[in-house]
Image: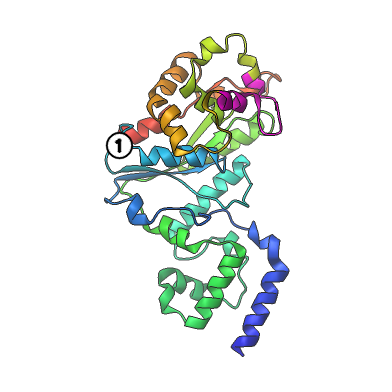
Amino acid sequence: MEQFQFLGLMMWMKKRGNKMEKSFRLSSDGMFSRPEEIFPETPLRIIFLSVEGNVTEQNYFGWLEKYREKLGIKTGVHVHPLRRGKRDNFSAPAQVLELLEEYIEIRESDILPNRMRKVIPTKYTDAFVQQYMKDPDSVDKDKKEQFEMLLKQVGIDLEYQFFVKEYQGQDDLFGVVIDRDYNTHTVMQLNEIRKQCIEKGYHFFITTPCFEFWLLLHLVDVKKQYKGDMQKFRDNEKRTNKYTFTSLQVSEYAGHSKKISEKIFRQYYLNHIDYAISQVKKFFSTDVEKLIGTDETEDSKKGKLGSNLPELFKLLREL
């Protein structure tokens, strides 16, 4: 009987296939450190970030966590960008918020979020899933193996779910990191996401036109070097298949595309974060409403150049 159930399960997974792979958001892709390596001490605060980019922001905040002591981040304070699988390319602001809320749902309960639960056959009852989440070794061995094979097939990384559920600080904060991205995100969309964040107590971090502008502020005196070119940043048009105007400038100065290696981070970003903070405060905007812009004119929709990411560093350094 178990053999027939197993074959039936395999046929069900094959039939569902690609549809299941993108029914959830939270995943580590198998690329994360052991919990005790990340948090050797009891955390005072962990700032969990749901970020729009699947590579650049992940790399930047990951290296920021590694070198937090050198950056003046308080002992016991951490930053953790929530991981997504490589196949998860959903990066609209609403989906970035969805990823954060999926994490919080896992953190606060012993059941899988509805988006994950929907891809699991009904033979695995809520009681079974809840028991498995509490103690995987307490369920029937054969059923456990089949269940874990199913999870692997649909791309649900429960090991990472256990990680984000177990490791909590005393005063944790949650936030989203969004690009203004005038060409794809409307003023209305961003204001709605911001409103939801305010209502739920999440932090809303945004850079105009995109995260790469924040990176560029580490690399060069933007106001001086690009005098007369500010509108090009606000328009941020595609220059090649790989680059927009802003990301191309970052590539030319720092020599990388999306991926930021540890060597690149140490060479170009690690010692220049305070320079970026001072530049954006002095020459650009840190006001969220101005960064988002308004619908009054086509130009006002693009928002003001800048970023409110200095607020994140204040939260990390001033517990």
For disc 1, the neighbor class at 10 Å (few under 14, some 14 to 19, many from 20) is some
Judge whether 115 appears above or below 296 on screen.
Answer: below
> Do we see residue 187 in this rendering?
yes
Asked if 157 appears above or below 186 in the picture, the reply is: below
Q: Is residue 195 visible?
A: no
Q: Quadrant of the N terminus?
A: bottom right
Instruction: Report the front residue among 310 and 226.
Output: 226
Callout 1, which amino acid? Glu
Region rendered in magenta: 233-252
Identity of the residue drawn at 63% across and 66% down: 119
Residue 243 among those drawn in magenta:
yes
Residue at label 1? 69
Query: Whole-percent x and y of residue 126?
Result: 52, 72
How many marks the image carries: the answer is 1
Colour scheme of the rendered structure: rainbow
Q: Residue at x 53, y 71 (%)?
A: 148
Residue 195: horizontal and vertical position, in percent? 54, 37
Q: Is residue 310 left or right of residue 223?
A: left
Query: In the image, what residue occupies the spot 58% across and 29% down?
Result: 210
215 or 277: nearer the eye?
Answer: 215
Give the quarter of the image for residue 45. top left
Q: Is residue 216 above or below residue 178?
A: above
User: Residue 300: x percent and y percent?
Assistant: 65, 19
The residue lying at 66 percent from left, 81 percent from top is 7
Q: Is 29 a magenta residue?
A: no
Q: Is residue 14 above or below residue 213?
A: below
